[in-house]
Amino acid sequence: MSQSLSSQPQSEQRQLVRTAMKAPYLTREEEKALALRWRDDKDQEALDRLALAHMRLVISVASRFRNFGLPLGDLIQEGHVGLLEAAARFEPERDIRFSTYATWWIRASIQDFILRNWSIVRGGTSSNQKSLFFNLRRLRAKLSGKREHLPDSEVHRKIAEALGVKPHDVAVMNARLSGPDTSLNAPVVSGDEGGSDRQDFLVSDAPLPDEVVARSIDDERRHNWLKSALKVLSERELEIVRQRRLSEEGATLETLGNRLGISKERVRQIESRAMEKLKVALLAKQADRAAFSH
C-alpha cells in the first residue's frame, strides 16, 4: 500500500474493498498462531494473512470518519498503518482477540491523520481537544434533535460538561468546524478585480513603521541625556540610583543601607538629593519637560 489509495482509480479501490470483504475470518487459534509467527520469526506471510483478515475492520472504522472531508482511500490507508502497528505490539499470550486490540490503533492512526490534514492550523493538540474535535458534531446533532430549542451558549455548556472541557473551548472548536480554511489573499468579493484581499481588513495592534522609528530615535536621545546627566553624581549617589531606579528588581533601602554601612533613612536622603541633581542636569540639556515623558 505504498501508493496513496486516493490516487488510485475508483475501480481499484472498489476491488480492494471486495478483496477485504471476501477474506476469511480467523479463529482465535489461527489468529494466535499467525501473531506468534510474525512476532517470533518475522514471517511476512503470517503478517499478510493477519492484516488481510482484518482489513474489513479497517474499512469499517475508516467509514465512520468520512464526514471530515478527506478521501476514504487515504483514511483506509492510514488505518492500515495502525493495523500494522497493532500487529507489531500485539501480545498473543494475552487472552484478548486481535481485532479488539487493533481497533484502538486503527482509530488512533486515522484520527491523527485527520488532525494533520483537516486544516492548515494544527488542532487537537491535547486529549481533551482531540475528544472535542471528534465528538462535537455528534453531541451537537444529538442536542439539536431534541424538541426544545436551546441557545448556542446552553448547547456549548452541555457539550463542555459531557466532554470535560470549557464552554469557551467548545465555542472556538465549533467556529473552526463551521467552515474550511480561507486564504488571506482571497478577494473579499468573488471576481472583484483590483479589490481588497481579506488580509487588508485584519486589525493590527502594532504601531505604524513611522511610530516605531520615531520611538527608537526618542529612546536613544533620552538614553544619551540620562547617560550625560549621571556624570554629575558622586560614586555613592550613582550606586544608589543604579540599584534603586535603573535596576529591574530595584533594591530596597534596607538592602542598600546594609551594603553601604549606613541607615536606610540615610540611603533615602542620598537618593532624594541625587534625583534632584539629575533633574537639574536634565533640564539644563532640555528645558521642555514633555521631552522626558514616554
Image (tube, rainbow, N blue to C red):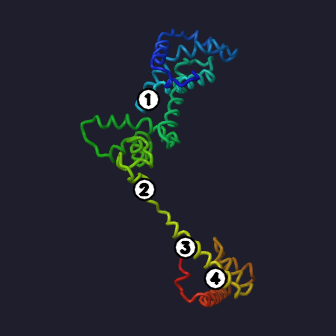
Q: Nearer the viewer, mark 4 or mark 3?
A: 3
Q: Mark 3 points at which residue?
A: 214
Q: Residue 225 carries which label?
A: 4
- Name which of mark 2 and mark 3 comes first in the sequence: 2
Label 1 or label 2, whichever comes before in sequence order: 1
Distance in Å between CA atoms under marks 1 and 3 = 55 Å
For marks 2 and 4, give the CA distance: 41 Å
* Coordinates of residue 112 in the picture (x, y in percent): 53, 34
Q: Mark 2 points at which residue?
A: 200
Q: Residues within 10 Å of mark 2 (few under 14, many from 20)?
A: few
Frontmost of labels 2 and 4 is 2
- Residue 173, x across and y down, in percent: 42, 44
Q: Is residue 131 left or right of residue 257?
A: left
Q: Which amino acid does label 1 sit on?
A: Phe
Q: Which comes before the other along the chain, label 4 or label 3? A: 3
Indicate which disc, 2 or 4, sits on the residue closer to the N terminus: 2
Question: Callout 1 environment at 10 Å: few (<14), some (14 to 19), or many (20+)?
Answer: some
- What amino acid is labelled 3 in the image? Ala
| Other-residue count near label 3 (Cα within 10 Å), few / some / many at <14 / 14–19 / ≥20 | few
The residue lying toward the viewer, choosing from 265 and 242, is 242
Mark 2 and mark 3: Cα distance apart in space = 25 Å
**Residue 65: which numbered mark, if any?**
1
